[in-house]
Amino acid sequence: MAWDWEFTGRIIPDLLSGLVVTVQATVLGYALALVLGLAVALVRRVPVVGPLLHAVMEFIRCTPLLVQLVFVFTLAPGGISAFTIGFLVLGVHYAAYTAEVYRSGIEGVPPGQWEASRALSLPAHRTWGAVVLPQAVRRVIPALGNYLIAMFKDTPLLFAITVGELMYQASRIGGVYFRYLEAMTLVGLFFLLVSVPSAVLIRRLERRYAAV
Amino acid sequence: MPQSDLLPGGAPGAGGPLIRFDGVVKRFGANTVLDELDFTVDAGERVTLIGPSGSGKTTILRLLMTLEKVTGGVIWVNGEPLSHMRGKGGLVRAGEKHQREVRKRIGMVFQQFNLFPNMTVRQNVTEGPIHSLGVSRDEANQRAEELLDLVGLGEKIDAHPTRLSGGQQQRVAIARALAMRPEILLLDEVTSALDPELVSGVLDVLRGIAESTDITMLCVTHEMHFARDVSHRVLMFDQGKIVEEGPPEQIFGDPREERTRTFLHAVLDHG
Amino acid sequence: MEFFIDRFPLYLSGAGVTLTITLIGAALAFVLAMAVGVLGTMRNPVARGVATFYTETFRGIAALVLMYWMAFAIPQLTPYEFDPMFAAILALGLNIGAYGAEVVRGAVNAVPRAQIEATIALNMSWARRTWSVVLPQAWAQMLPTFGNLVIELMKATAIVSLIGVTDLTRVAQEQRSATGETILAFSSALVMYFVIAQALILGVRLLERRANRRLGRAPEGGSGLLALLRPPPVTATGGGR
Ligand SMILES: Nc1ncnc2c1ncn2[C@@H]1O[C@H](COP(=O)(O)OP(=O)(O)O)[C@@H](O)[C@H]1O
Ligand SMILES: [Mg+2]
């Protein structure tokens, strides 16, 4: 059975609607990962609570996202949509990575900067908000960008919990028409179309900002 | 040190000089480092290159070792063009195969030793003979032992290079270069990276090699006593040109050029 | 606890499948990474082009999509049908191999120029130089990131449960539907995944130590056993899936 262009044309609208969901899940999940990761990186510096939180994040980071998704989806009460669960789990999972990125960024701020803040008797919120974090975040922009691409490429896993993203649409089409070739190939192409240019962009960012 | 057959000797050139720089030009971008440089070195001759930093001495050695490519002109080694080969209607740029053939005659010792940290001293010294020259493992090992004895490191043969002092590492590097039985040995400021108390050990090894063999040496150094003791001829460089050349007694005792005088003054004041 | 003890053999066999896919996939990824990574450091533009094409393509497509494509699109295109396990291993190996190739390329390019010049002075051939000087020195630098990639690979193997391979994830789902014990069924699997991950981290850490010792470097973070238990560094290469 060879490639069918007419069929390809017919399934593109469905796939595009899936792509919209994919992008939505990525954006929401990533926003959560950015915020939660920073919070984790800061709380990690607190005694007792910090190491405990770190252990939890380590556990999340060392176990499969797919299992976490299915686990939470199965446990969650009926009222919450699969999409909500999807981007929440995605965000928490990736927070385990972004937290480490922020941490290395914070540790990379030269000790002189802390000493200078002390010398100026800056209050803690100014030291962090005006001195340390702006420098740390700048250094980690490329690394964070890499995780955006990585997360985008992980969204197909959401189809396992029936989120109507790209992969879900493709496998639904495949199941209905008993044709997987066109839909699956298009999904691969869509991913390439987004991943390759964004990888180029990240490399530019890496050149612009000091890499961690 | 007795004359030994352990060390290679300079093969008689095909009538002419062993090394010949023929209008050699070397540019890095817009920076012309060597401008139409001509000089020759005879087989068995030991020549020291002196001159201020940036005058192109290292570049000359690196060109000979084929670590850099000439921008213009030709370098001849034993009558063979080094960076070129005879092609139809004249000389063409040499391919890798030709370069490897000519390179067999040349060995180099670097300022920073450049020993391989993933190998023991023995492996450093036998790697080239076994895999570049096709010498048997037994023969390479035996030669490594002899050469390491010669540089006074016989008992360090199975040590790791990072466990050795700088002076010891440099002596291993000398043994490694000699293990390839080169006709020409290039030495680029081989003691500059060493702590002062380690310098004389390395220089003594080189003196021994100079006395006991007729290997051709091109040596860049700021150790003027050493240069006076071992070299037949000294070339004084400035801005990629030979300012003055002559036997060491003349260059160090009675320099003719003002530039040589001020340079020697500056070096001897600080040395 | 009783839940877990009763079903331990089931989970263990699932973990065995997971580990098998991980190790074979890692072996495939390793070979690809080395070959393509070295290609990417060559001067020949064709070699570099091949390397770039491979890394950009297989990093760009998620292993899950690739696996589905091989399992469902290939039979439609050709008379052949892949065994699901084979499709999974191939997809994971190709995907992680692409990340690994970039690691190899970076590590090879980071070997000091002076070391290369020493090999030229010893008249070594390109092949000999690469094999006996460049790769052994780059190896120590590759290992930490390889360690992260192996963990990513191990986690990504869970996708095989979606095409009918009875791995750890599949066992957990079957036990959940059989018993209705969602929390026990899944957390047992998660704990086993975590244990496998820790074992892999420890293994790579030991390799790292050996590699550094060979280069005459002191192991990072001290030499005691405790140093092995350091949390692994996170590399910024991004998820290997
Ligand atoms: N790889 C290179 N790229 C650009 N310029 C170089 C390079 N190597 C040497 N040069 C330049 O060539 C000139 C001569 O350098 P060198 O031969 O090292 O001098 P010397 O050994 O006499 O100190 C210097 O101006 C140096 O900056
Ligand atoms: Mg120099």
Image (tube, coloured by chain):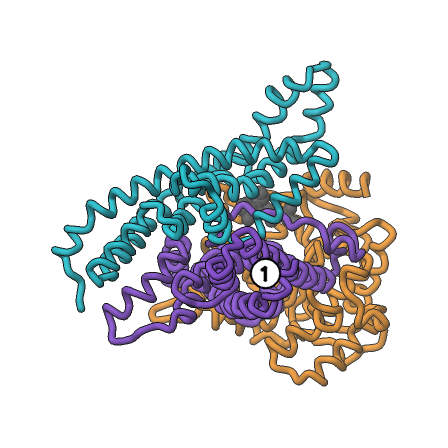
On screen, C28 above or below A127?
below
Q: Residue A87 versus residue B118: which sits nearer the camera?
A: A87
Does residue A93 appear in this view?
yes
Q: Is residue B133 left or right of residue B208?
A: left
Residue at 77% across, 49% down: B252
Residue at 25% across, 76% down: C79
Callout 1: SS:
helix
Does residue B228 appear in this view?
no
Position of the N terminus of chain C by quadrant: bottom right
Toward the front, the furthest residue is: C179
Chain the render paints orange: B
Q: Position of residue B238 (x, y in %)?
A: 62, 44
On screen, B126 above or below C133?
below
Chain the render paints purple: C
Q: Colour of chain A?
A: cyan
Q: Position of residue B13 (x, y in %)?
A: 59, 74
Q: Which residue is mark 1?
A: C116
Question: Please, what is the three-letter code of the amino acid marked with disc 1?
Answer: Ile
